[in-house]
Every structure is written in structure tokens, then in C-alpha cells.
Image: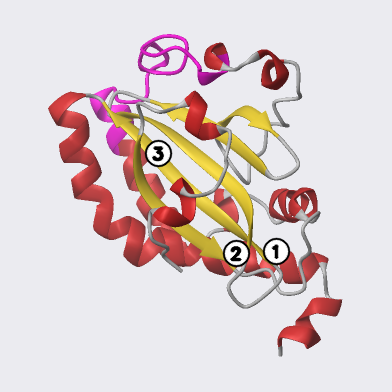
Amino acid sequence: MRLPATAHTDRPWRIHEIAPDFRLEDVWSFRTPGAGPDDFPAMLAAMRASGGPSRYPLPVRFLFEVRWKLGGLLGWDKPKAGIKARVPSLRDRLPDDLREAPAGPESTAIPLTPVYELDQECARELANKTVHTIMHLGWAPAASGGHELHMAVLVKPNGLFGRLYMAAISPFRYLVVYPALTRQWERAWRDHHPEERAADA
């Protein structure tokens, strides 16, 4: 479910101090019935176990395939356009306490580069010729009780071209990609916490 920007900006996330120059693009919630305040690591583990883009529904896989083919043809995803080439990694900005903490494991379920991972939030990044983007995951109280996963997408488009690109893909994010992620990640929680299926029925 799409959330207002304040669902992200009003939370005391560490990402605010690290990436104040990034624009908040989207905030989305994922229901995790029965989850408690300490279950963020369990949710991340469930997501990783659920598999990555190869497990997405066919329409989403098709969109990603078209995007990677187009990026390959136009050179959007060359190494020189990525992290530590076109833009420095956000890890270079981390304060000492976060720099010393584990960044988090690489994951095909979340195919971005880890920046940091804490017990209530984590951040990953991706850069190419169009944009430098952050996927921030946070664990927040749910309006209906318990806790749920929030995903925020923060972006720094690469000039006018990047802004046009973000505008062009916006309908696909809302109509195809985010609903598919919702189904996959919420199912991942239930698959790894089967006792919650009955509680949510």
C-alpha cells in the first residue's frame, strides 16, 4: 500500500542524516501480521529466502528484461556509470558507528549494493547513467497494530535525462512492480511464519 511521505520523513531513520540531498520518490508498506518490534531481521531473512527477480511474476520479469536490454543497448549500466565510478558510494558518507557495523549480505532478492543494516532499518544503493537510487527498508508500527515493513525509494536523477526517465517509469512502478513486490514479500513473511496465516485469516 502506498503511504504518504510523512510515513518516512517523520520516522527517526538514520538515512535522513546520510542522504539529505536525495529526493523521496515513493513510500510503500508491506503487511506482516503478527510481527513484533524485534522482527525486522526475520523479515529480511524471509525476503532473502523468497528468491530474487527470477521469482517475480511474468509481467515484472518482462519489464526488467526490457529495461536491461535497453540499458545494454544505450550503455546506461556500464561500470563507469555505477557506484564508485560515476558517483561515490553512500558508504563513504557513513558516520563511524555505521561504518563499523556490518553493511548486510549481498542478496539476489534485493539486487542492490548494501550500505548499512541495523536492527530496525537498512539501506541499499544502485547507480547507473539515469539515476543514483536508494532503497530504504524500515520496521515501523502498523496502524492496525503490530509492526510492518516500509520501503522508501530515494533518488538523485542524473540531470534532465534522469528526471525524464523517472517520470517515464512511474506508471510501471505503481501499476506493476510495487504490487508484485507486495505479493511476494508479504507471502515471504507468511511462508516463514505459517502460524501467522491463521491469525490473519
Question: Which class describes the residues within 10 Å of circle 2: few (<14), some (14-19), or many (20+)?
Answer: some
Residue 197: image location, x then y, percent: 77, 81
Please tell me whether residue 18 belongs to the stretch shown in magenta: no
> In the rendered structure, which amino acid carries the disc numbered 1?
Ala
Question: Which class describes the residues within 10 Å of circle 1: few (<14), some (14-19), or many (20+)?
Answer: many
Whether tag 2 and tag 1 are in contact, CB under 8 A, the answer is yes
> In the rendered structure, which amino acid carries the disc numbered 2?
Gln
Looking at the picture, does residue 25 appear above or below residue 60?
Answer: above
Q: What residue sits right under mark 1 in the picture?
A: 188
Asked if residue 107 lies left or right of residue 166, the reply is right
Q: What residue sits right under mark 3 in the picture?
A: 154
Give the numbered dot on residue 92: none
Residue 14: image location, x then y, percent: 58, 33
Q: Which residues are magenta?
A: 70-91
Which badge, 1 or 3, comes first in the chain's sequence? 3
Residue 198: image location, x then y, percent: 79, 87
